Image (cartoon, helix red, strand yellow):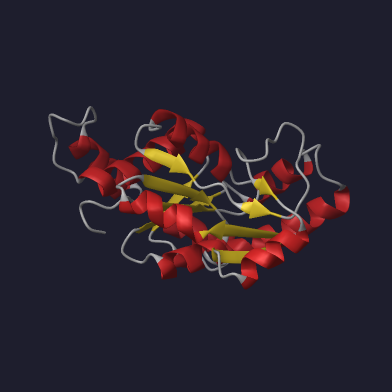
Amino acid sequence: MTPDRGVLVIVSSPSGAGKTTLTRRLLTEHKDNLEFSVSHTTRLPRAGEVDGRDYHFVSTERFDEMVRAHEFAEHAYVHSNRYGTAEAPVEEALSRGKDMIFDVDWQGGKALSARWPQDSLKIFILPPDLQTLSNRLRTRATDAPEIIERRLHNALEELEHYSEYPHLIVNDELERAYAVLRAIYLTRRYGVADRPDVPYPLSEMGKVVEENTEAEAHARRLVGRG
């Protein structure tokens, strides 16, 4: 990443691990520097979702047109629906020094970091345990039982890709997990030396990142390798 370019923050996790809650909170706190990348999808909107804010909801035909026109930086099937990130608005934002945050699965994270390797900051959110992950998915009233079972299966597969992410966060307690996410983002953007123009104790942020040492061992236990 060059000094005049923005940071491309890629946050992935199994469905139900809390990445959306964490990314939206980071966006709210740092709205002056950070923009949310609004993906295109062929799935129907859920209750409360707004076109253009949560997703760009498009038809399968329109999605196919964008694929043929090479408009996507990445696109994939997820839970039988199609999702994609339009390349042009991302590059425009990064070029003017604006940071972008992505709430994507491992496939999207891999494609985005391949397209913008120098700009990317990859973070993976881990659930506290598999039972909590299952409970979160089963208590979602918006999804049918067969969709929940599919999401649970896919969530376990998603966990297998944790090693592709340099930064791991265990979301066992929201405030602690968010503190680590904030620290990772701020130290990437500003470094670890305290600066008068930055209202955050960057040296302390750096310590938070360094102390998050148990996350990899936790990930290995979740996937049965520890």
Is residue 130 toward the left or the right of residue 149 in the image? left
Residue 42 image-quadrant placement: bottom right
Q: Position of residue 221 (x, y in %)?
A: 54, 60
Q: Position of residue 26 (x, y in %)?
A: 44, 36
Is residue 127 toward the left or the right of residue 189 in the image? right
Residue at 82% x, 53% y is 147
Viewer-proximal residue among 83 and 131? 83
Note whether residue 111 is visible: yes
* 120 lies above or below 38: below
Note whether residue 223 is visible: no
Viewer-proximal residue among 53 and 125? 53
Residue at 65% x, 58% y is 83
Q: In what quadrant of the picture does the N terminus appear?
A: bottom left
Viewer-proximal residue among 115 and 155? 115
Q: Position of residue 120 (x, y in %)?
A: 37, 59
Residue at 76% x, 56% y is 59
Q: Position of residue 180 (x, y in %)?
A: 38, 41
Q: How many marks?
A: 0
